[in-house]
Image (tube, rainbow, N blue to C red):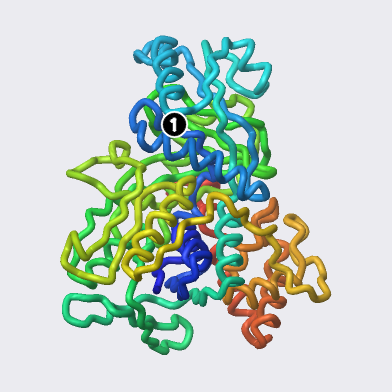
Amino acid sequence: MIIIGGGITGAGTARDCAMRGLRAVLLDAGDFAAGATGRNQGLLHSGARYAVGDPASARECARENEILCRIAPHCVERTGGLFITLPEDDEAGYGLGYRDRFVASCRDAGIEAEALDPAGALAVEPKVNPALIGAVKVPDGSVEPFRLCAANLLDAASRGVDIRFNTEFVDFVRSGDAVTGVKARDRFNGAVSVFYAPVVLNAAGIWCGAVARKAGIDINMCPSKGALLIFADRVNHMVINRCRPAGDGDILVPAGRVCIAGTTSTKVPEDQWTCPEVSREEVELLLSSSARLCPSLSSVGMLRAYAGVRPLVAVGDDATGRGVSRGMVCLDHAGRDGVDGLVTITGGKLMTYRLMAEKAADIACAKLGLDSRCRTADEPLPPFNLSDGGPSEIVCRCENVGSAEVRGAVKKLGIRTMSGLRRCTRIGMGLCQGSRCGSRTAGVLAGALGDSALAPALEKEGKRERSRGIGPLSPEAPKK
């Protein structure tokens, strides 16, 4: 089969299919995890966030939380989480009465939820806003999305999946009403290749709609942009949420040595999906709202702002995307649109990627007449190891990444850019944000690619990408 999309859904499906005995090629127009997979908050959902408004999604998250902690312990951190009630929530009608409803909804969805008084909340999370009037403890946590995606890809590749990044989908190959393959273009040399397979899976995230249009199919994608802010210190030890209906700036996630404040939900036009920008107004909103969760953040420096576009599917017209379900959408276009050989998997969340992959692989196997069950809920992901096994010197001191991992990223995953290398190794994601290691990294990557003359262009690319998200954090220029 052919998989279009190298984010977490495509990666998970590639691994699932390979484990069932299918041969697969995975194509992505950009770098490793360049879409929503590399631009989210890294929340290990307990499902509690959806318990009141979207119980089906809450149950999915609760089940997948347990599975992910079991099969990928090296990619998650079980910090626990707090949903807090502040005085202004009480004034808005979401006080302790709503908290009790929230606890009941969590338990109905199979999510552990314990109501705490202010003293109990401060005992488990000393940095939470001391003005809170109540809280609920839930099994939230954090997940490393880059490592999780790379781990799935590495295991898929070890099982024979052909992974090709920077290979842009151009069009479908058709035979009557059936899709029988795809045409794809190498973004570096322009060469067009044709791939044939009886099943093509559209797992292109927010771009699923654009891919489907090539087959004359309409998918009502709802482009919901979420802005986020990275603080330079890990102030909170637990995930902190507001105990009220989801809104802007109501969650703070500890991740490694930093914490990430989020998020917003706004519609954006298609020309902004690839590199969504964060405005100064969004930064100011996240600063003020995160300080209500954790007041000590007011004295912590910031690293950068960034945004991702959620691949949601809308029914009707929604102004912000808050009302659109975070549930998955799996479409067999043979029955829905009369186009055989094409399947789309989209919607959902990072937390439910494995379940989404299972649904997509089930359909693929049924189409191919293969009776093979999913094993991804039981078989752990192998330990994450990008090294090529050769001699290694430190390239990035902030993240402790060596040259052997750079070479391994090229050999094992076909990485050819600084952006792709950053996502799969975390080079340049530390406190220096690539300012100290950028030139050295470019040289090592150029050597791994077999052409040292590429180093200046790679360094330029790295600097350009690292400059994104810093502008809104800088002091505003004086007006003339």
Q: Position of residue 114 (x, y in %)?
A: 55, 18
Which image quarter: residue 394?
Answer: bottom right
In the image, 471 versus 100, the foreground residue is 100
- Residue 258 visible: yes
* Residue on which disc 1 sits: 49
Q: Residues within 10 Å of mark 1 (few under 14, many from 20)?
A: many
Check the image and report above or below for 468 versus 322: below
Quadrant showing the N terminus: bottom left
Q: Position of residue 306 (x, y in %)?
A: 49, 50
In the image, 389 versus 68, the foreground residue is 68
Which residue is rendered at x = 20% and y = 45% of the image? 315
Q: Position of residue 380 (x, y in %)?
A: 62, 53
Which residue is rendered at x = 40% and y = 28% of the image? 51
Check the image and report above or below for 213 versus 357: below
Q: Judging from the image, what secondary structure is the residue with disc 1 in?
A: helix
- Residue 417 visible: no
Which residue is rendered at x = 63% and y = 13% of the image? 120
Apparent side of residue 392 relative to residue 295 in the rendered image (left or right): right
Check the image and report above or below for 84 versus 233: above
Q: Amino acid at mark 1?
A: Arg
Q: Position of residue 404 (x, y in %)?
A: 75, 72
